Amino acid sequence: MLTQEHNIPVLQKSSFEEQYLPVRNAEQRLYSDEVVRMLPACAVDHPHAAEWLHRSRSAFRLIQYLQTNQPGRILETGCGNGWLANLIATSTTHTIVATDINQFELEQAKRLFHQKNLQFICADGNEAIPGLELFDHIVFAASIQYFSSLSSILNRSLERLTRHGEIHILDTRFYKSYEVAEARERTRRYYLSLGYPQMISNYFHHTREALQPFRPEFLFNPFSIISKLTRSANEFPWIRIRKSRQKL
């Protein structure tokens, strides 16, 4: 695991990248190659062990779902160090294109993972969905909160789906409208405590109400009675948005 004492190469081309990488380092989220190869499994004394337990559950739910689908093309937007894209590539017969703005972790992903059905591409927010090809699935795993407009990124994603394509949103909290002000204040205090106040304006609190025009389906709902009984209430929802369900 890297620490704040490490020198981070300046590979970035945008102000967001220049802010984001030091924050990842301060949060102890820049991992050694050995740790990344094992993700989502990690040591019980890992500083983010509880988070990775939740993420492992959501990842394997997604993989089980994708294994029931015919082979197709998947885009993961905001892939970070590539652990999820690699897991999908090794567990299914789909072809995966994984993108991120963070070149430091993207280079790590390229160095570690070499599946024939997996490709890593550097893409900024305006090019989050690269090229002109269509995808059967577009996955946002702990990444959609970095897009300022939920409606814009979802509409752009829908345009790049095949006729029966789907968007999957994992590992992200959606708020009720009345919760947003308090959530923003928590985020403000958090980034101030890390010493990176500039990141406050780059983290967005999307609402459940903003999702509704896209007719979302909750394939996993942490607020359901079953989830509460199985102690899954602290996990994030798994949201599917199908192109075939959209209003014309």
Image: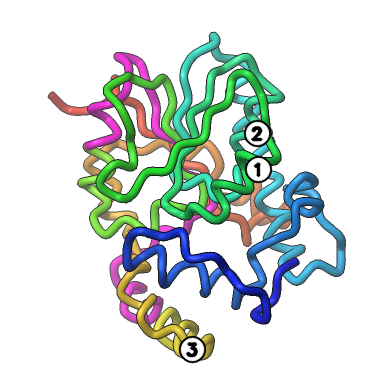
Seen as rendered, the residue at the extreme top is: 70
- Relative to 56, residue 167 above or below: above
Q: Is residue 115 in the magenta section?
A: no
User: Residue 61 in the image: x percent, y percent?
Assistant: 65, 35
Marks 3/1 in contact by CB < 8 Å: the verdict is no
In the image, 103 versus 93, the foreground residue is 103
Magenta region: 156-185
Left or right: residue 5 compared with residue 14: right
Marks 3 and 1, how far apart at CA: 28 Å
| Amino acid type assigned to the residue bearing label 1 in the image | Trp
Marks 2/1 in contact by CB < 8 Å: the verdict is yes
For the N terminus, the quadrant is bottom right
The residue carrying mark 2 is 86
| Amino acid type assigned to the residue bearing label 3 in the image | Gly
User: Residue 113 in the image: x percent, y percent?
Assistant: 68, 35
Q: Residue at x 61, y 51 (%)?
A: 225
The residue carrying mark 1 is 83
Tell me which label, 3 or 2, sits earlier in the chain.
2
